[in-house]
Image (cartoon, coloured by chain):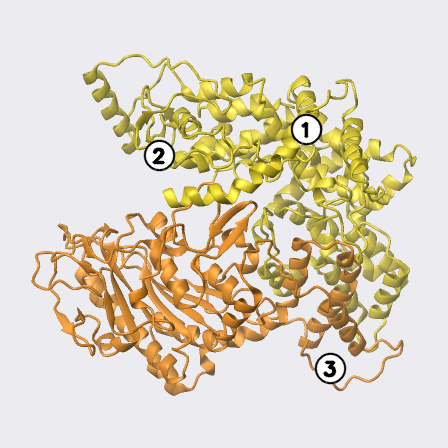
Chain colours: A yellow, B orange
Amino acid sequence: MRVALMHLLLRFAFISVSSLAFTGAQAQELLSPNTEVAVAVDHYIAEKLQSRSIEPRPVADDATVLRRTMLDLAGRVPTAKEYQWYFEQPETVRRDMLVDRLMQSSDFDFHLRNSLDELLLANRPNDGEFREYLLWAVRQKRPWDQMFRDMLTARQADGAEKGAVQFVSSRVRDLDDLTNDTAMLFFGVNVSCAKCHDHPLVEAWKQDHFYGMQAFFKRTFITRKNVISEKPFGEVKFKTTEGEEKSATLMFLNGSVAEDKTPKFADDERKQLEQQIQKLERDENAGYVISASFSPRRELAELAIRDDKERFLAKNIVNRTWLRLMGLGLVDPPDQMHEANPASHPELLDWLTRDFVASGYDLRRLIRGIALSQAYARSSEWPADETPPAASTYAFATTKALTPRQLAASLMVVIRSPDNWPSPEDSVAWNKLRNDLENQAGGWTREFEQPGENFQIAVDEALFFSNNDRITKDLLRDGGDRIVGKLKSIEDNSQAVDQLWVTVLNRKPSDEEIQTATDWIERENIDRVESLRSLTWALLASPELRFNH
Amino acid sequence: MASNISGLGPQKNGLSRRRFLSAAAAGVTAGSVADMTAIHGLRSEALASELKKQNKRVILLWLAGGASQFETWDPKPGAKTGGPFRAIPTNVTGIHISELLPELAKRMQHTAIIRSLNTKIADHGTGAALMECGRVGDPGVKYPDIGAVVARELGRLESKVPDYVSLYTSTEGRRKGTSGFLGARYSPMFLSESMTPPNIVRPDIISEIDHHDRAALRDVLAKRFTTARRNQAVDSHMSAYQRVHGLMASADLFDIEREPESVRNRYGSSQFAQQCLIARRLVEADVPFVKVARAWWDSHGQNFETHQELCADLDHSMSVLLDDLSERGLLEHTLVITLGEFGRTPGINASLGRDHFASAWSCSLSGAGIRGGVAYGKTDDEGQRVVEGEASAGDLFATILAALGIDHQHEYMLGSRPIPLADFGTNPIRDVLA
């Protein structure tokens, strides 16, 4: 371990020095709290672009902004009718109208739920109750600090919050996972480096921080009947790099310590309780519960919510929400929020965090603000013969791979005949269909991989699109309810191409594309329907559908 | 793009199939060979290509559930922990192995046995992850397994064959394998339901030529999008589609009916042996890493009957595989690893079983880069502990890499964090290397 530590220290020496340039620049006074979120975003982004003399890309065309906003706020691409609706609205206000309409739709609730689920439970096994809880909370507009408290302290017996317990219960069998996932996902801090030695990068992080975090979870256990409980006692002991044996205190990442109110137990009382706990862990019919008067997990929730200096809880979700919408976190990677890895725009992160806390941890206000900024709406293209500036300048929009749910829901939208979707103004009809769409999409998600760091599309996916029967025989059917069926009924080939592009790619085809596509349809000796089918396939398998751009 | 395009006359609008295909070909060359992973290390490109030229490959015979070292590579006849089976001499003087492996005993010149593994972790999931990745995971870092590392280091980016194939047809202990932070480009092609990979065969309702043309059309239409948006994920989408037809053409590699009857007879009818034959076909076609799993060695009860049955299959299948590789001149390029997640206890329990044991157990390495006819390391008389040449999972990982000519200390950069291929502080076991 000594070798490893030396190695890391050497490696990181130069990083720490060069980062002084950033941390050295003291934050100026922040913009007024009364500034609109979108205005503050654009102010700080523009400031940095100007200071580096970078000319950002202009705002993307309307069709692109519509598609991007729909994917990020509704979790799917627009229907052809929504596309039409958008262009019927007055040009200057259509973006605002779209965002406000989406935020009141069931699409928004489903998508925010799915995004939080992907963040918090990822591929861990769960019985669906966690997703139900998240949907309930999102529909309630439940503030993030309360959701966090639910997830850390919920018990199975509670009401609508009970599904929240799965954050803990899906990790309870591995104390390191429970500790580190909580730190990474709620506080933006990966403390695992501080397990075997003090953190090589961050002077402030000691082994005490890692084991301090662990101490909050040490007493958590699961009974044979899958009930999450806390033991009335139990502490974390660890060996420091100097070989000293230490007991961890209940210490949060900002250094605050919770008072340990564990009652004193006599030796035989303790022994008896330990036996009862063991029985609970092994025996389904133990028939009793253990209740602890002092709950370290509850203490952690309160310490984190009260943290008004570092604001780990707020800052992390602000950064992760920014990452989800902008494709790159202000702090990147998002689990390395520490002094040696400063934000690309520290004042913006501070401003957004302050606003988020002042708004009562309101995720909607944050999402709306980012989605209405100019920075969000920039073109994702950069001339092929020029080297683009770093993505962290936000001079152009990042091209983001769709999540499995976004991709599945979008496929379900585009392969239907556009006539089969209700008008966007008929929210009753739409909400009903949206439920079905969510379920249908759920049946496809495991075919695709969740994007993460260094994400790559697997060849399995290309093989799936190329050869799987579900694509060929289901999505590309030529029945009247399908897009191929609809195209079949349009006699004029360029009109059919127009319809196909608007439905699948959510934009008008270029002249060159119309030419290529009509040439394709008009090839000699090839059945028109087969050509329409293969043309549709070429768009379903296109990168343009696969990415949010 | 090797479709049959002859016999098609000019068409009325002048747009022949050929034009689509050549336009597509022009569109896809740009950028298709760009390195897609952001995980660059300090490796010299010249050295890397030199390595790849040597065409090293790996077949991992995975003994899922954990085989007993006593009944395979490290017999202790006469000891109270030794069990009922004898040790037999091999064709290498001084090396004895269990009588349950008589055929392998005749072929020890290819094989190095390591008898001194102390890997400490004795539960299936964590133990398997440890042996596959050569280290205990850190929360927050997804490590690639040996197959993904070999695919990344020895595979060719533009390869038409898969570079990591995993055959695992039983349900016990089934593990898909993971490419971790190396990304999906190096994920295994996983065969669990049948002997043919999923979605590799063209659907019957579309002709071969239409399948190719459709792909060419896709490439043409995709060009506008990809040219102005160059990033790793977009590039990987492009290269994934470019690999489709190559991989489809490799479907035949999974079809052992294409082997002469004499070869099929030699391998015989056990599923494991047939999968070994597939593995040979794959490495022959330059697939760098193939894993074949044989389950289920977890003999908590009736250890000796279990091993009689499973060792017979292993002895036969591995022997035929070594012979076949050797006769084809492939063995000098192919490393055959025989390994499970751990070994089994010296103590024999009341059900005549052996339980999980990771403190003193064995594995073997044969072929490429290996000094054959070696038994490395030593356990005590009862097989309770390692007394000589103790090796960790990381040391074994480093040894495997070294046998393939890969620098085990080479580092991937995960963000700003350096991650060496084999864990910090691990060393190849030089005595088993050629």
- Where does the image place residue A278, in percent across and percent down from the top left? 26, 29
- Where does the image place residue A436, in percent across and percent down from the top left? 65, 42
Q: Residues under labels 2 and 3: Cα distance?
A: 69 Å
Residue B6 vertical placement versus B128 (above, below) = below
Chain that bears disc 2: A
Query: Mark 3 belongs to which amino acid?
Result: Ile
Query: Mark 2 belongs to which amino acid?
Result: Thr
- Where does the image place residue B195, in percent across and percent down from the top left? 46, 69
Residue B266 vertical placement versus B73 (above, below) = below
- Residue A25: give its label: 1
The kind of secondary structure element at disc 2 is loop
- Where does the image place residue A413, in percent across and percent down from the top left? 72, 48
Q: Report the front residue among A539 and B335.
A: B335
Residue shown at 11%/58% (left/top)? B381
Please identify the quadrant where the N terminus of chain A is shown. Answer: top left
Query: Mark 1 belongs to which amino acid?
Result: Ala
- The residue singled out by tag 2 in the image is A241
- In the drawing, does residue B387 fall left or right of residue A337? left
- In the drawing, does residue A289 fall left or right of residue A36? left
- The residue singled out by tag 3 in the image is B5
